[in-house]
Image (tube, helix red, strand yellow):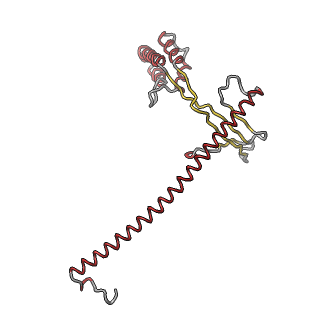
Amino acid sequence: MTETQKHPNEMSLEELEEMLAKRKKAEKSRAERERKRYESERDKMISEIIQEAITLQDQIRNFKARVHADMDMQEQILQDYGKIRSNSKGGFQIVDSNGFLMVKRRRDTEPRWDERSDKGVSLLKDFLGDTIKKKDVKTYTILMGFLEKNADGDLEHSRVMELLKYEDMYDDIRWIEGLRLVKEGYSSFLKAFGYEFKTKVITKENPDGKWQNILLNFSSL
């Protein structure tokens, strides 16, 4: 405390109020400076991250376009050499001469089910509920599970494929017709070509090498 500064016990009520007001003003100014400093540093960090993300997005977009064009060309070359199966729908992979680098193109599709599959499911459930449920609840539960729809209200292709393994189990017309309609009501369309990039890593534990993905999916890293 300086010589000119009074002890609070020596101050009048007005002087105390004035001192408290000055302290509140100083605290408010300090808090405002801290807020501005924090927001400035935060905004600078966000700006740098977003700008880098935009740059990387452009690089990845250009890279994907380049890979797609190169793999289209490679597909044509392989077709000319007769190295792609006649029933191939665009998916294939290529490996370098040393067997350590691989690029794989996937054909990513999405299933579609039309009104025929809905009618087929209705017939199948009618048959299973009338006949199988009374005889074998366990089998009924399993088969009904294959007919469950996903959150989008569609059948799951993998489940239907499992159901078709039981195709020869029953000769009821509802079972036969139901499965036929489900199969006829199915189609798929190409969403996009997906790509995988791999390198073969040789270790002491795995001298023959093991393929490892080069991950370009941010959430996978």
Residue 105 position, x and y percent, is 65, 34
Total marks drawn?
0
159 left or right of 198 in image: left
| Image quadrant containing the N terminus | bottom left
Q: Is residue 193 above or below residue 176?
A: below
Q: Is residue 176 above or below residue 161?
A: above
The answer to whether residue 132 of the structure is visible from this angle is no
Which residue occupies the foreground of this view, 156 or 30? Answer: 30
Which residue occupies the foreground of this view, 146 or 102? Answer: 102
Residue 108 position, x and y percent, is 59, 31
The answer to whether residue 64 of the structure is visible from this angle is yes
Which residue occupies the foreground of this view, 133 or 209? Answer: 209
133 left or right of 14 in image: right
Q: What residue sits 67% from the left and 23% below the top?
A: 87
Query: Which of the 4 quarters of the picture holds residue 134?
Result: top left
Q: Residue furthest left?
A: 13
